[in-house]
């Protein structure tokens, strides 16, 4: 029998996989038909011929039923935004978790990562993919109380599935480096929940506040003691915010 619960699709970030949502899925299973999705080339999936933001967004739309609620974490949030812009009738509501319209900073956008840091990540990735991804995990938890325990939890969720394919990692870095959705976001009219940790070192909290101020129909929840993985460090708070948003 088909579930009568609202469908909630979850899209992870760069280099990760669906296992990072295990705790959140458990928290929300009574309220939603939760479907955690792997991006192309991640979690054992094959790559697409073209690992671009556009192709990943189209791939996402092909996987979710019409009228779904879709959550995107970090890079996954950019995929969700691109999908919502290109297919406005397909996604009913959006949740942007620790995401941003632009990852890299410049003189017009101060709420991102320096381009040199991202370039260094790319070079390190080619030299030692596993160590680079583990370093990326540590950045996602920087500043959070009990960081060591949370980092271990994140590793345990991340490592059991096959590592992301090199082509997908490289394509993801290109997306992080080149994507800038700022001018298009006023066209994104779906109700949107912006969830952001105040201690986020990868997508600064100012980026989340900018999203909430710019999107035409946005709600904003800021978690004072969370960093870049609030669905792990503050899963109950994130789940409660999602429930409120879905039913308001």
Image (cartoon, helix red, strand yellow):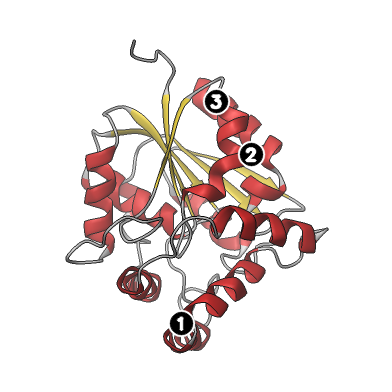
Q: Are the residues at dot 3 and dot 2 in contact (C-beta closer than 8 Å)?
A: no
- Give the side of residue 207 with respect to residue 43, left or right: right
Q: Tell which of 144 and 161 is nearer to you.
A: 161
Q: Residue at x 17, y 65 (%)?
A: 49
Q: Is residue 159 above or below residue 113?
A: above
Query: Which residue is tagged 1?
Result: 125
Q: Element at badge 2?
A: helix
Q: Give the spatial CA distance, label 1 vs label 3.
A: 35 Å
Q: At x 58% / y 68%, what residue is drawn?
A: 202
**What residue is disc 3 on?**
29
Nearer the observer: mark 3 or 2; the answer is 3
Indicate the quadrant containing the N terminus: top left, top right, bottom left or bottom right.
top left
* Image position of 138 (left or right of 22): right
The residue lying toward the viewer, choosing from 52 and 1, is 1
Q: Does the CB distance between marks 1 and 3 fall below 8 Å?
A: no
Residue 52, horizontal then vertical, whole percent: 25, 65
Answer with mark 3 or mark 2, whichever residue precedes in sequence. Answer: 3
Marks 3 and 2, how far apart at CA: 14 Å
For label 1, the SS is helix
Q: Is residue 132 above or below residue 199?
A: below
Residue lying at the far right of the rendered structure = 146
- Which residue is label 2 attached to? 238
Q: Look at the image and tell me whether residue 187 can be seen.
A: yes
Q: Is residue 9 left or right of residue 25?
A: left
The reply to whether residue 248 is in sight is no
> Callout 3: helix, strand or loop?
loop
* Location of residue 18 in the rendering, given as x and y in whole percent from the top left corner: 47, 48
Q: Quadrant for residue 39, please give it.
A: bottom left
Q: Residue at x 78, y 58 (%)?
A: 149
């Amino acid at each position: 029998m088909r579930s009568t619960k609202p469908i909630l699709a979850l899209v992870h970030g760069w280099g990760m996989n669906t296992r990072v949502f295990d705790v959140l899925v458990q928290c929300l299973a009574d309220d939603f038909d939760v479907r955690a999705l792997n991006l192309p080339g991640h979690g054992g999936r094959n790559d697409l011929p073209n690992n671009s933001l556009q192709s990943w967004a189209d791939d996402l739309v092909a996987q979710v039923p019409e009228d779904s609620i879709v959550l995107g974490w970090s890079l996954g949030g950019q995929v969700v935004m691109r999908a919502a812009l290109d297919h406005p009738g397909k996604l009913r509501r959006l949740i942007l978790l620790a995401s941003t319209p632009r990852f890299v900073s410049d003189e017009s956008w101060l709420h991102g990562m320096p381009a040199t840091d991202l370039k260094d990540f790319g070079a390190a990735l080619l030299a030692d993919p596993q160590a680079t991804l583990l370093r990326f995990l540590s950045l996602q938890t920087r500043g959070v109380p009990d960081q060591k325990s949370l980092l271990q939890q994140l590793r345990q969720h991340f490592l059991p599935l096959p590592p992301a394919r090199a082509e997908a990692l490289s394509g993801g870095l290109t997306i992080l480096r080149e994507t800038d959705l700022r001018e298009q976001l006023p066209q994104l009219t779906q109700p949107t929940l912006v969830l952001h940790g105040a201690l986020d070192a990868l997508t600064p909290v100012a980026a989340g506040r900018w999203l909430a101020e710019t999107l035409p129909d946005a709600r904003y929840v800021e978690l004072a003691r969370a960093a870049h993985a609030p669905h792990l460090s503050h899963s109950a708070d994130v789940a409660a915010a999602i429930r409120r948003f879905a039913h308001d």
